[in-house]
Image (cartoon, helix red, strand yellow):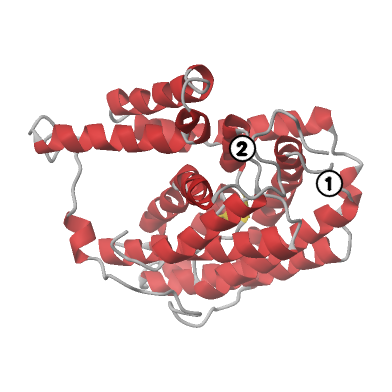
């Protein structure tokens, strides 16, 4: 039954222009994680060339587009953005720190991480499609879902706050604008109601660019806007399977990565309930959850083959965007996924 407070429910199809901009807003909302994860992994992996880092980030977005389309079309069919997960960071960093990888290139470390992710994906596929995840449902209810989602959001604080803290002027500008547009000005103009996150990000970035052009922000300033690295990036590059080399399987790496998979599964089950509630979809039943977890396993397999050094999970931040905009349309999220595929193939973007 559709939530009467929603502007667009899960099966609604907004006008094309609104769909396009709302999809782009989801892209901007999830933008942080696919960029932050490679940045955090670059040092343990040993990536020193910004061009290589850009290719890895592009691969993250490309895989997010594929897995989001798979999940929304054949998985649980909820309007959920799929992408890299911080749950896999600790196992990946542990693999990189193994003594055998002290004097090797970053591609070798990547190959071992890829293998661990590919092997672990079969574990998640089996857990999902055989229905074993149903055993978790007896422990999942409103009392457990709410703290889980809250803790996931709080856990991301340590990744976002230090970056925002490098210049709280731009950081607070973004936060204040999101609150202002989504909570106070949403009834004044439809654009504020539908696009609070996108507008806030674009205004904050535009402010930083103006201050850079006028010379107020110097190259040493944390909010300085530079196009130097973008100029060195290729125009077009579509990620290909095994682009970093053939995965190398090791028992220790695989076992360590399974811990990340378990955390990701628990996180996703909570996300399914939250997303269904906010988008006006029925409460997820066992089959819906089984298909969702199984498809996330398929997504992790794709991430391992293409080489993101990470897996895939449901994004809580985009569920929050649904709550802010009151737009739970599946078509909007699928449009965002197509934009991820396109933009992830253009190196300069």
Q: Report which residue position mark 1 lands on.
A: 284
Crowd rating for badge 2 (residues with CA inside 10 Å; few <14, some 14–19, many 20+): many
Q: Quadrant of residue 148?
A: top right
Front-most of 231 and 111?
A: 231
Choose top left, top right, bottom left or bottom right for residue 216. top left
Q: Secondary structure at mark 2?
A: helix
Labels 2 and 1: the sequence-earlier one: 1
- In x, y percent, where is residue 94? 53, 56
Residue at label 2? 322
Cα distance between the residues tagged 2 and 1: 17 Å
Does 203 appear above or below 271?
above
Q: Residue at x 46, y 32 (%)?
A: 191
The quarter of the picture where the C terminus appears is bottom left
Q: Position of residue 60 (x, y in %)?
A: 47, 61
119 vs 10, nearest the viewer: 10
Q: Quadrant of residue 50?
A: bottom left
Q: Horizontally, is 247 left or right of 133 in the view?
A: left
The residue lying furthest to the top in this view is 184
How dense is the environment of label 1, judged by Cα within 10 Å: few (below 14), some, or many (20 and up)?
A: some
In the drawing, does residue 22 fall left or right of residue 269? left
Q: Is residue 116 above or below residue 263?
A: below
Using the image as rendered, state which of residue 327 and residue 242 is in the foreground: 327
Residue 257, image x, y percentages:
63, 60
The residue at 82%/62% (across/down) is 127
> Is residue 264 positioned above or below 125 on the image?
above
Residue at horizontal 37%, vertical 36%? 201
In the picture, the disc for residue 339 is: none
């Amino acid at each position: 039954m559709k939530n009467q407070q929603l502007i667009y429910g899960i099966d609604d199809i907004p006008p094309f222009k609104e769909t396009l901009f709302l999809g782009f807003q989801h892209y901007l909302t999830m933008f942080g994680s696919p960029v932050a994860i490679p940045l955090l992994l670059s040092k343990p992996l040993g990536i020193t060339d910004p061009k290589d880092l850009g290719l890895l980030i592009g691969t993250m977005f490309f895989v997010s587009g594929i897995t989001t389309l798979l999940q929304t079309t054949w998985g649980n069919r909820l309007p959920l953005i799929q992408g890299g997960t911080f749950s896999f960071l600790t196992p990946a960093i542990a693999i990189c720190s193994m003594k055998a990888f002290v004097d090797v290139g970053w591609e070798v470390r990547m190959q071992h991480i890829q293998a661990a992710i590919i092997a672990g994906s079969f574990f998640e596929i089996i857990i999902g499609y055989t229905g074993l995840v149903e055993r978790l449902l007896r422990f999942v209810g409103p009392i457990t879902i709410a703290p889980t989602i809250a803790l996931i959001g709080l856990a991301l604080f340590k990744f976002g706050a230090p970056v925002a803290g490098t210049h709280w002027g731009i950081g607070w500008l973004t936060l204040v604008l999101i609150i202002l547009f989504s909570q106070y000005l949403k009834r004044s103009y439809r654009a504020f109601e539908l696009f609070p996150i996108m507008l806030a990000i674009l205004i904050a970035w535009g402010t930083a660019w103006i201050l850079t052009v006028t010379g107020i922000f110097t190259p040493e300033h944390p909010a300085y806007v530079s196009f130097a690295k973008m100029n060195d990036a290729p125009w077009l590059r579509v990620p290909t399977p095994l682009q970093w080399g053939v995965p190398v399987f090791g028992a220790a790496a695989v076992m360590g990565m399974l811990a990340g998979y378990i955390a990701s599964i628990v996180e996703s089950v909570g996300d399914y309930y939250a997303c269904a509630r906010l988008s006006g979809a029925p409460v997820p039943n066992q089959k819906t959850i089984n298909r969702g977890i199984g498809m996330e396993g398929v997504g992790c397999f794709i991430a391992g083959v293409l080489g993101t050094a990470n897996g895939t999970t449901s994004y809580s931040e985009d569920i929050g965007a649904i709550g802010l905009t009151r737009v739970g349309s599946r078509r909007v999220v699928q449009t965002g996924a197509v934009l991820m595929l396109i933009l992830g193939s253009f190196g300069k973007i």
